[in-house]
Amino acid sequence: MPEDIRLNLFRLDKSYTTTGTQNETGTGLGLILCKEFVEKQGGSIKVESEESKGTKFIFTLPLYE
């Protein structure tokens, strides 16, 4: 994914969506909700992407004691 898109994935004031494998569309809220949920649990989320090769979404959560 291009860098400018990656930098805006978790922003409410920016919207970006593509069609899915069956031409479905999205609202762009899914990743924002995931980020909010992870952060409310004390974790973090990040994106690593290499254009035309693939993208990884990595999240961490603290251990529950």
Image: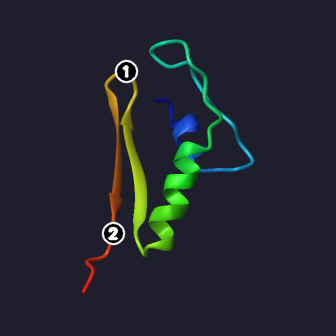
Q: Residues within 10 Å of mark 2 (few under 14, many from 20)?
A: few
Horizontal side of 30 relative to 48 (left or right) equals right
Amino acid tagged 1: Ser
- Where does label 1 land, which residue? 52
Mark 2–mark 1 Cα distance, whole angstroms, equals 29 Å
Q: Position of residue 26 (x, y in %)?
A: 61, 30
Horizontal side of 51 relative to 8 (left or right) equals left
Q: Position of residue 58 (x, y in %)?
A: 33, 52
Residue 56: image quadrant is top left
Picture colour scheme? rainbow
Residue at left offset 50%, top offset 72%: 40
Does residue 30 sit above or below 60 in this rendering? above
Residue 63: image quadrant is bottom left
Horizontal side of 50 relative to 63 (left or right) equals right
Does residue 38 sit above or below 65 in this rendering? above
- Where does label 2 land, which residue? 61
Q: Secondary structure at mark 2?
A: loop
